[in-house]
Amino acid sequence: DAGVIQSPRHEVTEMGQEVTLRCKPISGHDYLFWYRQTMMRGLELLIYFNNNVPIDDSGMPEDRFSAKMPNASFSTLKIQPSEPRDSAVYFCASSTTGQGSGYTFGSGTRLTVV
Amino acid sequence: SQQGEEDPQALSIQEGENATMNCSYKTSINNLQWYRQNSGRGLVHLILIRSNEREKHSGRLRVTLDTSKKSSSLLITASRAADTASYFCATVVIQGAQKLVFGQGTRLTINP
């Protein structure tokens, strides 16, 4: 398995533009997570899905952020409109049911909003 | 809000020495996990310890868990330059299903 695949690896966009981050979880994993990492706030859980259904989106900063998981092999995180304070590294991770396994993280998308 | 807090925030030791990092958390947990993050990369799962376990080993890693003190430690023995990374503890709270909450991490530097 190629692991959790995120795209793009880097994204530079202008303030006000729409940004879409993509994630392909490990096949067979039924949980998918979106995290954001900044120096100031560390790793923050934004939202997670179980069997493609959003379970907890309490970490989504505001209405400008939205996430979807149309099927078991694909998820998107969209920011519209983007702002400079959204600049961060966004990680996607997946895991399986049960408390015995850890998460598998993707390599992240480094987003810079100018 | 952060559930776990690592201590120290940064640690610098000589190659071959042992490195110990500590983690404290606030609420009851189902399990606690340790992750490593190399600069510019994603997090890599190292080890998971359940709330009913007190100690666990994996290669050069030794993790302890004291639920009465709400604390855990990660020991890396015979450190190598390749162990240079940030180390995070993360907890699965009993009420939070699969939700992992991370601490701020310890930056470990191994000097050759």
Image: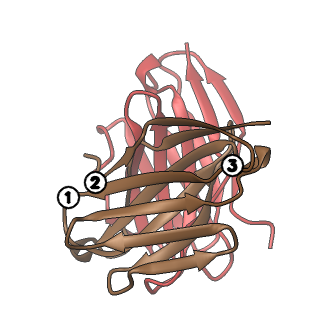
Location of the C terminus of chain A (image quadrant)? top right
**Residue A21: x %, y % from top left:** 60, 44
Q: Which residue is mark 3?
A: A107
**Tag 3's secondary structure?**
loop
Q: Are marks 3 and 1 on the same chain?
A: no
B27 over A85 or under it: above or below: below
> Which residue shows up at 74% across the image and 50% down it?
B16
**Residue B6: x %, y % from top left:** 39, 47
State the CA–CA distance, disc 3 to disc 2: 24 Å
Chain letter for brown, please. B
A6 over A1 or under it: above or below: above
Disc 1: which chain?
B
B47 over A86 or under it: above or below: below
Chain letter for red, please. A
Q: Which residue is mark 2?
A: B3
- Going by the numbered disc 3, the residue's amino acid type is Ser
